[in-house]
Amino acid sequence: MKSHQPVASSRVPKSLELFERALRLIPGGTQLVSRRPSRSSYGVSPIYAERANGARFWDVDGHEYIDWMSGIGSVLLGYCDPVVDDAVREQISLGTIYSINHELEIELAEALCRHIPCAEMVRYAKCGGEACAIAVRIARGVTGRDRVLFCGYHGWHDWYLAANLAESSGLDAHLLPDIEPIGVPRGLAGTAVPFAYGDAAALGEQLGQHRGQIAAIIMEPLRSELPPDGYLAAVRQLATKHGAVLIFDEVSAGLRFGMGGAQGALGVTPDMAVFAKSISNGYPMAAVVGRREVMEPAAQMFISSTYWSDTIGLRAALTTLREVERRGVPHQLEVFGAKLKARLNAIASEVGLPAVCCGVDVHPHLEFELDNPQLVPAVKTLYIQEMAKRGCHGNTAFYLNAAQGDAELEQTAAAVREVFAIIRDGLAADNVSQLLECAPQHDAFRRLVR
Ligand SMILES: Cc1ncc(COP(=O)(O)O)c(C=O)c1O
C-alpha cells in the first residue's frame, strides 16, 4: 500500500476511510502537518483517535496504543488528568467566556511571573505559532526594526515563512525542506533570516552584517540536545550588544525542563519567551512573557483577540502549573527518560542493532547509525510500522508525560526488542524496503502534500 487508498486488508480500515473522507473536504486532510498520515506508517499507523486516557489512546479501529507523542507534546500530566479536568469542568459550570474580563487572567500572569525568570508581564494567545507572532510583533514595535534572526520552528505565520522568499532553502534546516512560501507577501523578503544553532561566532557575524537592523533573535533554547557550553550566554550577550530582543520559544520545551522553563534550567534569561502546549495539559493556551521594559509598549500595539480571555485555557494552565510543581513532574520525566534510554540502549546492544537512544533525558530520541545512511528513512518507517502493530504510537522521538510508568516502559521494551530484531534481520538480508507496508517516511514538504 503505497498511496492514499483504503485497503481492505489494512489493520486500520476505519482510519483510512475517514482520511479519504477528510481529503475530500479538508485541504491536506489534517490541521497539523505532523498529523498527516504520511508522517507515520500509512495504512498501519492509526490516523483517527476515538478517546485517550493517561498514557494511552484508542483509535477508531479499536486498537489501544501507548502514546509516545503525548498529543504532539501538548500533554504533560497525561490524558484526562483528573485534577485539571475537574478544574475545567468547574470552570465550565461558571461560564467559559464573558463580555468582560476574569480574575484568572491576573492569577495566571502572577503564577507565570513567579516561576519564569524573564517574566515580568504577560500576554495570552491560544497556540504556539500565534504567540510567536505576537512576540515578534512586540519586538519589532519596541525596536522600530523589521528584520528578525531565527533558529528552529516557530509556526506557520507570514513573518516566519518569509524566510523562504529571499532564499528558497531558508527553512530547510529549521522546519522542512521544499516549503514554498505560497501566499506570503513578497514584500517580506529578507525580513526573516535563519541562523545555525550552536555557532555564536556565526551569529555575531550575521548581526554585524545587519548592524542596527535586527529587531529580534528568536530561537528554541534547546530541543533534544543540551546547548554547547556557553552558547546561550554568548547569544544573550550578542543580543544585548546589538539591541535586539532575545526571544526564547519554549513552546515545546516549556515546563518539561522545570517550572522556570528551559531558561530556568539553563541559567540564561531572554528578554521574552513564548509558552504553549505543555502549560495547559492539552487545553488550548499560550503565553508571551517578558521583561517589563519590552512588554509594556505592547499596550500601544493592536494585539487583540476575543478568545485569548477564554477561561478554560486560563484555568487549565493555572491548574497544570500547580500540579506540575506539586507532583515534581520535571524530575519525574528526567528519571523516567533516563531509564527509557538505558533500557533501549541495552536492547540495541543485546540485539546487535546499531541504534542509540540519546538526547536530553526529558526528550530522548532514537538514531540508527547505519553504514548506508540512505537506508535511514526506510528503517525509521519500519520501526514506526512495527511499533504501531505492537501498540506503541510515535516516531523516533519520545515525548514523555507524567502518566507514563513501568507498564509503558515494559510493553515498549518488549516491542522494541522484537522490532530491533526485525530491522537487524532486514538489514542483514538487504530487504528492509520489502518489509515496509507503506512508502518510506519522507521529510520534504512537497512530497508530504502529494
Ligand atoms: C518550538 C515551537 N514553536 C512553535 C510551535 C507552533 O505551535 P502551535 O502548533 O501550537 O501553533 C511549535 C509546535 O510544535 C513548536 O514546537
Image: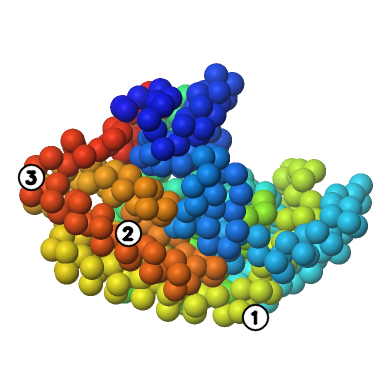
Q: Say if residue 224 shows up in the picture.
A: no
Tell me the distance, in whole angstroms, between the alpha carbons under discs 2 and 1: 33 Å
Q: Which residue is mark 3?
A: 429
Residue type marked 2: Ala
Residue 55 vertical position relative to residue 64 in the rendered view, above or below: below
Residue beneath the point at 32% across and 64% down: 414
Q: Which residue is mark 2?
A: 415
For marks 2 and 1, the one nearer the N-term is: 1
Tell me the distance, in whole angstroms, between the alpha carbons under discs 1 and 3: 51 Å
Quarter of the C terminus within the rendering = top left
Quarter of the N terminus within the rendering = top left
Tell me the distance, in whole angstroms, between the alpha carbons under discs 3 and 2: 21 Å
Residue 360 percent across, percent down from the top left: 36, 69
Residue type marked 3: Ala
Q: Which residue is mark 1?
A: 326
Residue 3 vertical position relative to residue 420 in the rendered view, above or below: above
Quarter of the figure with residue 421:
bottom left
Residue 130 percent across, percent down from the top left: 61, 45
